[in-house]
Every structure is written in structure tokens, then in C-alpha cells.
Amino acid sequence: MNIVVCVKYVPDAQADRTFSQDNTTDRTNVDGLLSELDEYAVEEALKLAEAGEGEVTVVTVGPDGAAEAIKKALQMGADKGVHVLDDAIHGSDAPATSLVLAEAVKKAAGGSPELVLMGLASTDGTMSVVPAMLAERLGLPQITQLSSLEIADGKVTGRRDSDAASDTLEAPLPAVVSVTDQINEPRYPSFKGIMAAKKKPVETWSLADLGVDAGQVGLESAWTKVESFTARPPREQGEIVTDEGDGGTKLAEFLAKAKLI
Amino acid sequence: MTDIWLTPERVALRDAVTRFTKKHIAPQLSQWEDDGAIPRELHRTMAESGYLGVGFAEEVGGSGGDIIDVSIVAEAIIQAGGSSGLIACLFTHGIAIPHIVASGNTDLIDRYARPTLAGELIGSLGVTEPGGGSDVAAVRTRAVRDGDNYLVTGSKMFITSGVRSDFVTTLVRTGGDGHDGLSLLVIDKGLPGFSVSQPLRKMGWHCSDTAELTFDNTPVPASQLVGGEGEGFVAVMRQFVNERINLAVHGYAVAQRALDLATEYARTRETFGRPIIDRQAIRHKLVKMHRRVAESRALTRSVIERAAAGEEPIADACLAKNSAVEACDYVVDEAVQIFGGAGYLRESEVERHYRDSRILGIGGGTNEILDDLAAKLLGYSSGGKR
């Protein structure tokens, strides 16, 4: 089975993240990495490929540094990578990103892929909408937010857990599937994997290579824009309720004052 | 020119081991210190990720890489919240199986090296005896040929991972006095007459089990001989260079970690309305600690690079280890001082490094033995340079 995994290069969530002068995410002055939520998609793809015959291709859309996200996935064990790199993409929103990804996935898979895997969300945008948009653009069924996944008899089956219930969902292949951080434990790149990644092929494509009009993407075409931002206020120190036999009452009063009960 | 310590692959290796350590080691280390041992499962988890076998060829079950990569793994583990003691017990194979691998004995490699690098077996090295440590040629444990077996009698002391290990690569006397009479035997745990003491209680390295091993006419098949009879001393000595280099890495890496912890503490700890890092007395301490770390790391890394290039820098490995040990002793002491009372508490990491580091100037050749060896090799004796 040939699997395409879409991954994103994001600012390190542990670092101080901010915006650039044009109100897009600052990707220059902060360390970037493969979105941790995408590691679960890479791991699931590797497990599926290892269980049978197949190839895992990692696709990313992003600036120069995004090559690092591909490299990390290759070190984990993916077979090859595709980096869509074009200055015109800067500032693209989710619809534009899904447009570029759709063309990249088709080209990478030589037509229609058998399975497209994605993470639950990126750790910077955290919108969770690109998998659905990509499925729509590819004309494929989508199953999102799976915490288990099985491929059999030309179908993908999986479980989606929510607070209220767990649903079992299935779709015929090919399909677009997004997975949660409950589905597996992503492997660490082994030393052998790190060394082997050096020799794995990575192609870099422009919008022209994909036949995408630059006017359809980028900040100017975005449906949503960040108008302004302010830094998150520092966390205030919590209130310590000392239990002197009346702890329950004090706690209830605290919650009532905060209009939580 | 590309820094060979900062190639993309080595940066990735450091990053991967750092993440592994933060998840699988650092949160549990205090518990393992209390337990007096690390779990076997950690060996398997580490092997699955391919880090246990760094420095060993793929042909014998390793992951490839050289002594620079081995050093990067150790640096990353310590700087991500691991410890010297943790590495001592998790990577005991670094001293237990190199002789087996170097011998080229495919039977022993398949039965011991390969499963150990897969995390399935734990090995240890038995050289030191109750009657002597650094004087390796004085080993008294005797192996007498008896048909297809050797009958081994004697005892080994301060054996790292000796409680948990499945086999011991043991230096025994098969011949007469002196180093020519020494050989290496791989001795399986559980053989008749082979007994293991209770874990020895130590000042530091609490997560690393240490044992005294006793052999009483223990029959060991002659096929367990590593190399030939009389080749044990040279084999052990050859590996001592790597062991000393590895311990030097522990020294400067622990010192760096203690410096980082002390710096962070000094930034947040306030006295009289100011963080103590703004006090000249503390700043000067930190910068002296920084200098000691930088000096010992630079010297050690230069020796590592020569070893990676195929040299056998015996004298300079001695100097590097002693330099790193001195730096480590100085820095962990100052780190505890900066932490003050908090640094004297068991739950503080610098307290553990302070205790752990004391062994670094004793194990793998004491400071005094290494100074003496370096002096001889560098010509500081009436006999001149050898």
C-alpha cells in the first residue's frame, strides 16, 4: 500500500511563539520542528507499510525550514519526501493549503493515493480542518480523528472517541484519514534511521510544478487574516484555600464567586 | 569547516536521545535510585530505538557509529536529566562485550554480543578483585583446564551490573604470574559454584547495581574463552582507553548539567530583593565553572576525535579523564554551594551528581594510576620517553 502522509513544520510549542510584522506566524525567530501531532500519522503509516508491502511518502508545504520536518519523518523510516516550496505560499490559510496539498498528493502518488494520513491538527494553527478540506478536493471519503485504524478488504476502519461515545467508522479506500495522539506511540528516529535518511530522495516542487495558480494562495487570497494580536497575560497566582474544617464551604464559595456553580 | 560534532546526523541523534531520556529515563530515575537498579525493560526499549548499539558494528547487532556518536549519546542522556550512574548500568555492555566483538569469535558474538545489543541479555566485566583494583596484572582468580572445561576459583569485586548481569566477561589466570598468564572467559550466571553477593551499598550511582562475584570450582566450557590463552591482559588494556574516554565524557557532561542547573537556580533564587546571579560572587563562580567545563570538554573531545581517526591515545586519554574528573568535582561542589540548603536535599539533582561524581576519579583507573601511566608514557621518569 502506498501511503502519503501530510505533515507540517511548526514553531516549537515550548518556545516563545509570536507573529511576524504581517501578522503571520513567526517561523524565522523560533526553532521549528515536525508537528508532534503529525508524528502519530507518520508512525501509523510506517506500521501499515511494515505490516505489508508499501511505501510511505511524506509531503509538506512550507518555507525552507520545513525540509527539517521531512527529514525527521525520513529518519523515523518514511521512504521519500516532497517539499512544496514557493514564496507565493506565504500566509496561506487552510483552504489554500489544502489546495496545494491536494495537487502535491496527487502528483506524489502518481494519480490517486491509496491512503492519505494526517495528524489530528497542527500544533500551531490547531484548526483540524485541513484533512476534511483535502478529502473534498481529492474527492475521497474522509474519516477524521481516529484513535485506532485497520485496513482490510479494501476498507479503512477505525474508532473515533469522544466524551459521549466511541464510534466505529469505515470508508472504502482510497481515503483521507486523520489520527489522534491516542493511536500509537511514535518511534524515536533510530541511529540507523538517522544515517539512512541521508540517502532518501526528497523532491522540491514549486506551485508551477503542481499547476497551481499563485493567485489562489498566499496572504492576499486568504479567507481569514489576523488583524491584531496581544501577548497572553501572565498567569495569575492561584488562590490557596486552607482547610480549617470549613474547606468544603470555602471551596463552594470560591466556585460560586467565579460563577462556576 | 563543519564541526564533526554538529553534523546534521549527530544533531538528530542528540535530539532523539534527549527526547528519549526526557520521556523514558528522567521521570523514573529517582525511583530507580531508590530501587537500587534499573529495569530490564529499559534495555529493550533503548535497544528498540537503536541507541543501545551505537558504537558497535551492524554485523554484530549494533547500530553503527563511532566513539563520537557514543559520546553524543552519553552527553545527551546526562544533559537531559539522566546520570553517570544510569549510563554505567544501562551501557555496561560498553565494557563487557568489546573484547568478544574484537575476538571475531562468531559463536560468542551470536550468543552474547548480539542479544546484549538487542537488550535481551545484560553483561558485565569482571576484572577488579578484593585484593587489588588498578593492578590488573595481579589478578588471582584462577582457571584450571579440566577436560573441556576450565574450573574457575576466585572472586571479583565492585562489578558494575553484577547483580543483574546474565554473563560476566571475566579476567582469569590460566597461566603463570604476570600479564602473560591472563585470559578472558565469558562466564554464565547460574553455573555451579558461581555466587553473587547482595548489591553493594554505595555513596552514589545508586541505580547502578554493584556486586561481588565468587567462583568456587565453577566449570566453564573452554569454548567460552575470548581470543587465546594469555591474551586477556592486552584485550582488557586496549578497551581501557575507551572506558577512560567514556568516563571523561561523563565528567564534563555531568559538570555541564550541574552548571546548567546552578545557573537556572541562580536566576530564580532571590536574596535581598535580587536574583543571586546578579551577585558578583555567584557570577564569578558560574564563569569559573563554565571555564572548567569548556577546558575539559575541549581536551576530551580532541582525544575522542583522535581515537575516532584510529589512533590509540593512551596517555592523552589519561589526561582527559583526570581533567574531566577534576572539572566535575569542582563544578558539582560549586553547584551544591550555589543551591545552598536546597542542594543538600536528596530531591535536588545536584545533590545526586555530587555523590555520583566521586566514583569518576576511582573507576576505570584511579586519578593516581592514570597520572602515573601518563607520566611513564610522556617520558616523565628517569628512563625517558617510552
Image: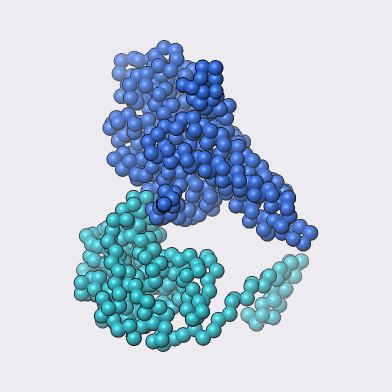
User: Residue B207's image quarter?
Assistant: top right
- State whether residue B342 appears in this view: no
Q: Could you tell me residue B12's position as x and y percent?
A: 41, 55
Q: Could you tell me residue B358's position as x and y percent?
A: 60, 36
Residue under the image location 29 percent in, 40 percent down = B59
Colour representing chain B? blue
Residue under the image location 71 percent in, 51 percent down = B282
| B105 is higher (above) or lower (below) than B292 | above
In the image, is B286 to the left or to the right of B366? right
Residue under the image location 37 percent in, 76 percent down = A87
User: Residue B118's image quarter?
Assistant: top left
| A80 is higher (above) or lower (below) than B380 | below
In the image, is A225 to the left or to the right of B277? left
Q: Extreme top residue here?
A: B176
Colour representing chain A? cyan
Residue under the image location 37 percent in, 36 percent down = B310
